[in-house]
């Protein structure tokens, strides 16, 4: 049984200009198409529209059908499939069974398309759209576009209120994602670093599924993502002064702290260790998802790729890698940082140690702590990020100093190899685009990717770390 979204037409998808009879009058809101594209076909979509203008003889049924067909066709050209458009031609006085908030059309959709209404949503700019949702056991989201702002005082039922369709879809995706997590499902979500493959961190069975979907050895621990600093006390047994300082300075952000775990943390999350990696991501929808899961909740999430492959920095990368193995992908756009978080070990009695360089630089961490924080050298069973074949595309990765780039590229081409070139204005820009470009190189069938290496400082050090791992000869079959 699939979840669906029932979309009101006028005032929700398109401007409400009264009784529409001509397709030229159908003007889409700016965010309608991008918002619906963000769903990547993970919901069945329907339009449920009252066209009482037909009953009032202001327009004909053919007029309404023409405008509807135009709306559906326009969306379809943008890759958005509307399964069916339900039109009520009646006026309220007719007392028909199809006029909102009556649930007739939703029942038909449930029957004809196998829709689970309890996991479905109705979005509209009239209180009747929300009452419709409630009457059907679905979730209503009220938009202030169209007549929404005007009718707001009439709205009797409690529901999320959004500025328009864009915000409504954001709410909806977070609510749906949290419901999936609560039921033990897997949700891939955007963070500012890379996309994570998340499960409720308190649900050992869901955690096990992460490992099987990723193809990751079970002794490799996961990072638990929190909605805010306050949740940290539930997950860490104690919070040393260094951790207080780093959380204060870098959270939300690309820093993961390894701390002694609390009794709450399942051993499935930590690979049997008594320490846990914790991070508050700096992406609104990630934090909203975790907050919606519950107060103080945690989402255990490794990067949302198959073990040993390039981390995803866009929702479409996750869908390409994991497809239907993940229950929901919460599209939060391209990741701003583009490489994984910095991992600092604060659990051992010794001085803090960087286990993996990442989005927060060593220099910045040392400045906050006022002491040296070395980066640990190669090789440990604990951290897959430290295995030499991690982060590998199919193409061979060659690193070149800026002055050598042209020569290396020529040499490769002279050998008849197809070459992709990756370079950027700054180390930060390279971090942002590196994983996407490695994927694109693979997609283009390149034999080799020549990357102009960044300077070994700040985030450049983290990029260099990933590049060296990608350049190490990967075993082809993982
Ligand atoms: O930016 C990131 O950190 C992304 C996003 C999704 O937050 N996550 C990520 O997760 O890169 P993953 O699982 O691909 O890498 C997590 C790293 C692994 O190298 C793991 O071994 C290490 O964190 N780690 C987690 N818990 C640990 C622990 N208790 N002790 C030592 N290392 C730990
Ligand atoms: Mg409307």
Image (cartoon, rainbow, N blue to C red):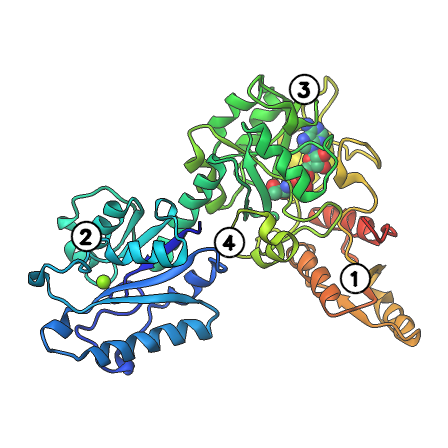
CB at mark 2 closer than 8 A to ligand 2? no
Identify which residue is drawn at 67% across, 23% down: 275
Neighbours of disc 1 within 10 Å: few (<14), some (14-19), many (20+): many
**Of labels 4 and 2, the one closer to you:** 2
Please name whichever residue, 466 or 218, is drawn nearer the observer in this view of the structure: 218
Residue 335, position in %: x, y? 57, 53
**Of labels 2 and 3, the one closer to you:** 2
Q: Earlier in the sequence, mark 2 or mark 3?
A: 2
SS under mark 1 = strand
Q: Circle 1 is placed at which residue position?
A: 452
CB at mark 4 closer than 8 A to ligand 1? no
Q: Circle 4 is placed at which residue position?
A: 331
From mark 1 to mark 4, how far is it between C-alphas?
Answer: 30 Å
From mark 2 to mark 3, how far is it between C-alphas?
Answer: 51 Å
Q: Earlier in the sequence, mark 4 or mark 2?
A: 2
With 395 as the anchor, is 290 left or right in this view?
Answer: left
Classify the position of ligand 1 by quadrant: top left, top right, bottom left or bottom right: top right
From mark 4 to mark 3, how far is it between C-alphas?
Answer: 33 Å
Q: Earlier in the sequence, mark 4 or mark 3?
A: 3
CB within 8 Å, label 1 to label 4: no
SS under mark 4 = loop
Relative height, residue 460 to residue 89 (above, below): above
Q: Circle 2 is placed at which residue position?
A: 127
Q: Circle 3 is placed at which residue position?
A: 274
From mark 3 to mark 1, how far is it between C-alphas?
Answer: 40 Å
Residue 15, position in %: x, y? 26, 70
SS under mark 2 = helix
Relative height, residue 138 to residue 181 (above, below): below
CB within 8 Å, label 4 to label 3: no
**Of labels 3 and 1, the one closer to you:** 3
């Amino acid at each position: 049984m699939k979840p669906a979204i029932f979309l009101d037409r006028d005032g929700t998808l398109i401007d409400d200009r009264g009784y529409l009879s001509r397709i030229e009058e159908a003007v889409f809101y700016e965010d309608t198409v991008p918002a619906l594209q963000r769903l990547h076909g993970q919901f069945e979509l329907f339009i449920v529209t009252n066209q009482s203008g037909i009953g009032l003889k202001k327009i004909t049924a053919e007029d309404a059908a023409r405008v509807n067909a135009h709306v559906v066709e326009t969306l379809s050209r943008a890759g958005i499939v509307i399964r069916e458009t339900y039109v009520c031609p009646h006026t309220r006085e007719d007392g028909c069974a199809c006029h909102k908030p009556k649930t007739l059309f939703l029942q038909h959709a449930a029957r004809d398309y196998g829709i689970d209404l309890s996991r479905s949503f109705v979005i509209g700019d009239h209180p009747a759209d929300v009452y419709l949702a409630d009457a059907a056991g679905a979730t209503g989201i009220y938009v202030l576009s169209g007549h929404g702002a005007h009718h707001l005082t009439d709205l009797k039922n409690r529901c999320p209120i959004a500025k328009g369709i864009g915000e409504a879809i954001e709410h909806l995706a977070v609510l749906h994602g949290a419901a999936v997590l609560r039921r033990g499902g897997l949700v891939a979500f955007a963070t500012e670093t890379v996309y994570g493959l998340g499960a409720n961190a308190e649900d050992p069975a869901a955690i096990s599924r992460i490992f099987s979907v990723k193809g990751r050895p079970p002794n490799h621990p996961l990072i638990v993502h929190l909605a805010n600093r306050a949740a940290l006390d539930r997950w860490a047994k104690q919070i040393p002064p260094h951790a207080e300082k780093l959380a204060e300075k870098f959270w939300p952000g690309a820093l993961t702290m390894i701390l002694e775990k609390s009794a709450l943390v399942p051993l499935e999350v930590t690979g049997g260790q008594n320490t846990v990696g914790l991070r508050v991501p700096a992406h609104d929808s990630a934090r909203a998802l975790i907050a919606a899961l519950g107060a103080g909740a945690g989402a255990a999430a490794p990067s949302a790729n198959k073990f040993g492959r390039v981390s995803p920095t866009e929702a479409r990368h996750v869908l390409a890698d994991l497809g239907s193995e993940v229950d929901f992908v919460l599209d939060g756009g391209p990741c701003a940082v583009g490489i994984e978080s910095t991992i600092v070990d604060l659990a051992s009695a010794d001085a803090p140690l960087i286990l993996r360089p990442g989005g927060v630089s060593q220099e910045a961490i040392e400045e906050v702590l006022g002491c040296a924080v070395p980066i640990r050298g190669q090789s440990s069973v604990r951290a897959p990020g430290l295995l030499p074949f991690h982060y590998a595309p199919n193409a061979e990765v060659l690193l070149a100093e800026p002055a050598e780039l042209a020569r290396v590229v020529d040499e490769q081409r002279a050998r008849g190899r197809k070459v992709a070139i990756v370079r950027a204005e700054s180390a930060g820009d390279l971090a942002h685009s590196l994983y996407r470009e490695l994927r694109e190189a693979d997609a283009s069938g390149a034999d080799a990717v020549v990357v102009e290496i960044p300077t070994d400082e700040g985030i450049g050090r983290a990029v260099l770390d990933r590049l060296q791992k990608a350049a190490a000869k990967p075993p082809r079959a993982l």
